[in-house]
Image (cartoon, coloured by chain):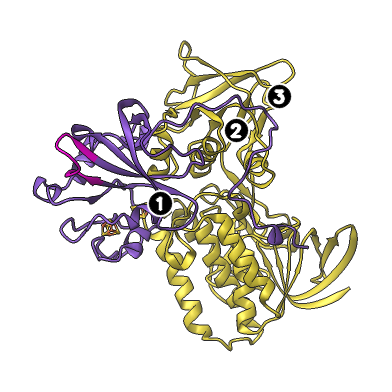
Chain colours: A yellow, B purple
Amino acid sequence: MFDTEMLIIGGGPAGLKAALSAAEQGADVLLVDRNPYLGGQLVKQTHMFFGSQKQYASERGVTIAEILTREVLNSDKICVLTDTTALGYFEDKSVALEIKGTFKTVYPKRVIVATGAQENTLIFPNSDLPGIYGAGAVQTLMNVHGVMPGARVAMVGAGNIGVIVSYQLLQAGVEVVAIIEAAPRIGGYHVHAAKVRRLGVPIYIAHTVVEAHGRESLEGITIACLDEKWQPVKGTEIELEIDVLCISVGLSPLTELLFQAGCKMEYVPQLGGHVPYRSENLETTVAGIYVAGDVCAVEEASAAMVAGQIAGLAAAGSLGYKQNNYEAKLKDAKNELAGLRRGPAGEKVRSGLWALTIAAGEAV
Amino acid sequence: MQEQTGIPSVDHILSTIPPKKRLAKGPVAVVECFQEIPCDPCYTSCTTGAILPFEDINQLPRIDWETCNGCGRCVGFCPGLAIFIVDDTYSENESLVKIPWEFSCLPEEGEEVAGLNREGREVARVRIKKVQPSPKKNRAHILWLVVPRELAFEVRSIALKQGKQVDRGRKICLKTQLSADVKTLR
Ligand code: SF4
Ligand code: SF4
C-alpha cells in the first residue's frame, strides 16, 4: 500500500498530457498503463495529425508518443508504472493495481481516469473466422510488431480510423480491395478519403457485410447495398475475395472504473456509449475523480490531449498547486478544446455534451 | 459528392485552379481541401503568408495566388495530403505536378510510371523528374511529375508498384516504429 497525490490511469494522449500539466503545477503524479510502453494508441498512428501546431499538427502520432514519453520520463514529479493495470476502485477511495503480477493498493488524493476506449465489433454469419480483425488489432500487428496481416483486405467502416488504417495497409504493401460503409456517407475526413481513392480503393457507402466465407480462415465476403431502412437489398450482392477483413465500426469508452466509483453516467450515442457527467474542469460527480480523453467522449487525439491538459491542471489546482501560470493555462486549454469542436466536424460531440456538463463544485 | 465517393466535385476542383495569368508566372499551390475540419498547418507552415490567416481553426484554407511562390513547403506539412504544386510553365506541352508521397516504394528519377486521377484511374504515362525529401523531414517525399499539360489538374497520384506476393505473417520493415529506447521502457 502506498500514497500518491495524483493517480493517472492510462498513458495515452490524454493521460500523458494530464501528467505533464499536473506535474508542471507542482503535483506529484503516479502514471500507470497496462501496456509495456506509454503512448496508448498514438504509437500505432503513422499518419500526420490534424489540429493546431500546439497539438503537434503535421507530426505523426508515433512521433508525438515519443515526444510526450520523453517529457514524462524527464520529469522528476512523475513516476511511471507500465505493465500495470488498475483493477478496481474501492469505497475507501483506494485503487487496486496489478503491477507485473504483484498486487498493490494505492490511496490517491486525486484520480484522473484516462482509460480510452475499445473497438466495437460487428456480428454477421461467420464473423468469427480467423482473418477477421478489429482495425486497431491490424494496426498493432503492422505498426507495432511489423507483421503483415494478409494480402488482400477489405475494411468495414469509412470513419477516420477505417480510412486511415486502409491507407496504412496500402503503405505496408497490402492490397485494399474495398472500404464498406453502412451509412450513406463517408464519416472520415474527406481529405483522408481522397488519399485512398486516388490510389484506386473503392468506397462502397450504404453497403454492409452479409456474410463471410471460408473453411479454416477467411476466404471472402458477400456485401450488399442497404436501403433507407438499413435492410440489405436482394440482387445487389457483390463477392469480394479477401483473406483479411478489418472492422472499424466505432469505439466505446472504457468506463468500468467510473461505474465502480459511482460516477453518474449517461448513455450518449454521439459520445460513443456510456459516459460520465463532468464539470468544465472534467471532474465527475464523484469529487476528486477526473476524466479525459476517449473515456468521456470518443473523438480525435488532439481533443484528448487538450482534455488531458484541462484535467491535469484542474486536479493539480484543486490540491493547491497553481505555481505555473495556472489560471491562464486552464483558460487557454478550455478555449482550445472549444475551438477544436466548433466546426461541423465537432457537431456530433457538441450535441452530445451539453446535457452532460455539470456546474463546477457540483461534485459530491 | 466527396462525402459519397471521396472524390472532390468538379466545382470544387475548378475553384482551385489559379487564373491563366498566374499560371503563366510559374509554380503555384493548389489546395484541394473542401471540408471544414479542425486543422491549419497549411497556414502555419507557409512562410510567405500566401495561405491567409485562419480566424477559426475549422475554417477552409484560403490562398492568395499572387503571394504564393510555389515553394512547396505546405505540401509537406498538410496532414490531409491535399496540397499540390502545379508549374504550368515547365515546357510547351508539359506541366510539372508535385505530389506528396508517403510510400516507401519510391519511383526512380527519369522513370515512366502510370499517372492516376483522383479516382485512381490511369490517365497518362508520367515521367518522374525528381524525388525530393519532404520539407517536413519526416521520411515522406514530394514527387515531381512531368505530365501532359492538359492533365495538370487531373493527375494527382502515381500507381503503387504492383506488390510482390505478400505472405500473411511476414515481417515488414517499419520506418515508423518507435525508437528502441522508448519502446522497451519499463
Ligand atoms: S507553396 Fe509555398 S508560398 Fe505557396 S502556399 Fe505553399 S508554402 Fe506558401
Ligand atoms: S493543412 Fe491541409 S488538410 Fe489541413 S486545413 Fe490546410 S489544406 Fe486542409
Which residue is depicted at the point 86% across and 59% down?
Answer: A100
Identify residue type, mark 3.
Leu
Secondary structure at numbered mark 2: strand
Q: Quadrant of the N terminus of chain A?
A: bottom right
Report the front residue among A139 and A21. A139
Q: Is residue B58 above or below residue A95?
A: above
Q: On what subunit does the disc labeled 1 rest?
A: A
Q: Residues within 10 Å of mark 2 (few under 14, many from 20)?
A: many
User: How many marks are shown on the rendered structure?
Assistant: 3
Residue tagged 2:
A246
The answer as to whether the residues below labels 3 and 1 share one chain is: yes
The image position of residue B154, as x and y in percent, is 26, 34
Q: Are marks 3 and 1 in contact (CB under 8 Å)?
A: no
The answer as to whether the residues below labels 3 and 2 share one chain is: yes
Q: Quadrant of ligand 1?
A: bottom left
The answer as to whether the residues below labels 1 and 2 share one chain is: yes
Cα–Cα gap, marks 3 and 1: 35 Å
Secondary structure at numbered mark 1: helix
Cα–Cα gap, marks 1 and 2: 24 Å
- Magenta-colored span: B86-95
Q: On what subunit does the disc labeled 2 rest?
A: A
Residue tagged 1:
A345
Q: Residues within 10 Å of mark 3 (few under 14, many from 20)?
A: some
Q: Residue furthest front?
A: B110
Identify residue type, mark 1.
Ala
Residue tagged 3:
A129
Q: Is mark 3 within 8 Å of ligand 2?
A: no
Q: Is residue A184 above or below residue A51?
A: above
Q: Quadrant of residue A106?
A: bottom right
